[in-house]
Amino acid sequence: MTAPAKTAANAESHVMNTYGRLPFALSHGEGVWVWDTNGKKYLDGLAGIAVNTLGHAHPKLVPALQDQVGKLIHSCNYYQVPLQEALAAKLTALSGLTNAFFCSTGLEANEAALKIARKYGHDKGIDRPEIIVYEKAFHGRSIATLSATGNPKVQAGFGPLVEGFVRVPLNDVAAIEAQARDNPNIVAVFLEVIQGEGGINPATVEYLQAVRRICDDRGWLLMLDEVQCGMGRTGKWFAHQWAGILPDVMPLAKGLGSGVPVGAVVCGPKAAHVLGPGNHGTTFGGNPLAMRAGVETIRIMEEDNLLANAATVGALLSSSLKRELKGLDGFVEIRGHGMMIGIELARPCNELLGQAAEAGLLLSVTADKVIRLVPPLILTADEAQQIVAILAPLIKSFLAKTTP
């Protein structure tokens, strides 16, 4: 995420200064609306960065989580956790894959995917396995996921990075084919179906299908990072399903628990049994509260038909914004799918973060020039038009200003 301009540090704060924060704190929410501690109301176009799938204080989710808190919050993985079995069964049924490992964050899910790829390579007798990754990718901020990330700004200051990654541009089949010809150590391809932090850059259907074929031909794992674009955000459960393919490894997180930290790695037959007891683990991952959140989130999404809502209301939001911004000098394009929308402008626009909040709309700016909208999947058509009514005039005013 591109941070807003840093505010003055609070001399009394004991929290590390790792975020540039806007000068207000949220107090509570209902539906797609949140209020700050001063009583100001905001339309939430960010959903905690694609996390609050069901919005805030959902009347079906809250009592389910209250029930679970009153029973059992945490159980370590020394014991069976029936809710893990329930969520794994649901995720495999929705994805067509076979097994799941549970953790707490997208970073952990991506770390687990990288470990699966490494061990898969070693099991095939490759001493130094390598993984194809992408320009503009973002997979996390641990040393390994940072190394897989394609953003020099977030990597700066943390070298030496982990070796074993081969970087290519997105949607360039020839670049993958060249690596396939020249590098015998490649064991996997690791990509976001829609790059989130990189600027809402979708992989094309044709590209995903081509990479699937190459992985099949070469015996590589296809690992699709669905941490931000998965869980119904594009109008299907997982964004790759628009291409009619199956991955071998699929990291998930963000929207899976509708605000409760839940991460998962869902695998198909080629990868599901690469890791065995002692190869990987977690303390908090898969605890009963997190698993209940995942099970209930999916149940409510199905009951309330939120995939169709994400597709139709997301398309309305995109088309309305295009209509308002088309032909403006400095407007580049709108990208994305469903309720994962990026509005690219011709110059850095981070100042719109604060301006939008002042106008009552929460959003983010990523890749310096791209306004990102990832609202709760419960967003209505009327609320989508309210986003447009707030945001379009701000963009027009911003673009009308001459640059210094």
Image: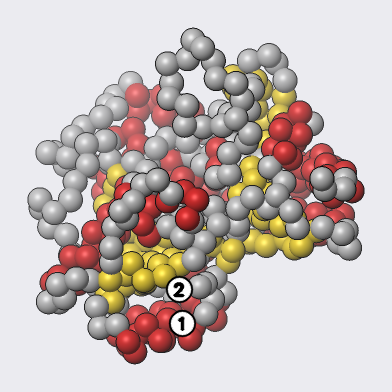
What residue did someone put label 1 on? 175
Q: Residue 331 at x, y = what percent?
A: 80, 58
Secondary structure at badge 1 equals helix
- The amino acid at mark 2 is Val
The three-letter amino acid code for the residue at tag 1 is: Ala
Residue at figure coordinates x 32%, y 55% from the top left:
161
Relative vertical location of residue 30 with respect to residue 273 in this rendering, above or below: above
- Residue 254 in picture, x, y percent from top left: 46, 45
Is 369 or 55 nearer to us in this picture? 369
Q: Residues within 10 Å of mark 1 (few under 14, many from 20)?
A: few
Q: CA distance from mark 1 to mark 2?
A: 6 Å
Q: Horizontally, is 148 left or right of 284 in the view?
A: right
Q: Which residue is located at x 16 percent, y 60 percent?
A: 275
Point out the tag, 1 or 2, that comes first from the N-terminus: 2
Q: Quadrant of the N terminus?
A: top right
Q: Position of residue 25 (x, y in %)?
A: 60, 21
From the viewer's perspective, tell me whether residue 268 is left or right of residue 245: left
In the visual, does 177 lie left or right of 23?
A: left
In screen coordinates, is 226 left or right of 397?
left
Residue 52, given in percent of the width and then of the height, sits at 54, 39
- Residue in the picture at 60% in, 53% down: 367
Quadrant in the picture for residue 3: top right
Q: Are marks 1 and 2 in contact (CB under 8 Å)?
A: yes
On screen, 34 above or below 86?
Answer: above
Which mark, by number, is residue 56? Answer: none
**Residue sitting farthest toward the top:** 12
Q: Is residue 50 something one can see in this rendering?
A: yes
Mark 2, residue position: 168
